[in-house]
Amino acid sequence: MSEKELLQEGKATRESVKAEKKAKQNNESKPSRWVRVRMLPIWLRILLFILLLAGSLALGAVTGFAVIGNGQAADVFKAETWQHIFDIVTKK
């Protein structure tokens, strides 16, 4: 039966017919959409990236200075070491 016929017979109201029609359309036409849920927010990813980058730079400096250069590993974090390297590079 059509919407017009149902309304004329008084078996249903306009709202109930529209609600029924909408429910039928939702079930048939809309496939469920996959929504991605992020485990880590973007700001936390950026922070982790910066921390990992700083850690890898420190580890690389320690490896280069202590293992390859035969120096003390703790000397990498002293300002005098970096001033000496800067002086060598700029030839002061």
Image (cartoon, rainbow, N blue to C red):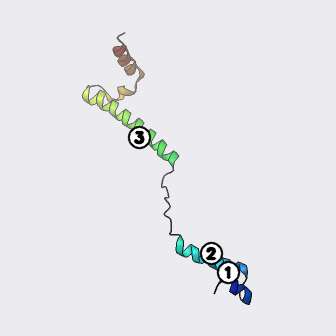
Amino acid, disc 1 = Val
C-alpha separation, residue under disc 2 versus residue under disc 3: 52 Å
Q: Secondary structure at mark 3?
A: helix
Q: Earlier in the sequence, mark 1 or mark 2?
A: 1
Residue located 64% across and 79% down the image: 20
Q: Residues within 10 Å of mark 2 (few under 14, many from 20)?
A: few
Residue 76 position within the rendered picture, expressed as x and y whole percent measured from the top left: 36, 27
For the image, the number of numbered tags is 3
Q: Residue furthest top?
A: 92
Residue located 48% across and 52% down the image: 40
**Which residue position holds label 1?**
17
Residue 58 position within the rendered picture, expressed as x and y whole percent measured from the top left: 37, 33
Amino acid, disc 3 = Leu
Q: Residues within 10 Å of mark 3 (few under 14, many from 20)?
A: few
- Identify the image quadrant of the N terminus: bottom right
Q: Is 5 located above or below residue 66 in the figure?
A: below
Residue located 45% across and 39% down the image: 50
**Which residue position holds label 2?**
22
Residue located 37% across and 33% down the image: 57
Q: Are marks 1 and 2 in contact (CB under 8 Å)?
A: no
Amino acid, disc 2 = Lys
C-alpha separation, residue under disc 1 versus residue under disc 2: 9 Å
Q: Earlier in the sequence, mark 2 or mark 3?
A: 2
**Which residue position holds label 3?**
52
In this rendering, would 73 be left or right of 26? left
Q: Secondary structure at mark 1?
A: helix
- Identify the image quadrant of the C terminus: top left
Q: Are marks 3 and 1 in contact (CB under 8 Å)?
A: no
Location of residue 18 by image quarter: bottom right
C-alpha separation, residue under disc 3 versus residue under disc 1: 60 Å
Q: Are marks 2 and 3 in contact (CB under 8 Å)?
A: no
Residue 73 position within the rendered picture, expressed as x and y whole percent measured from the top left: 32, 29
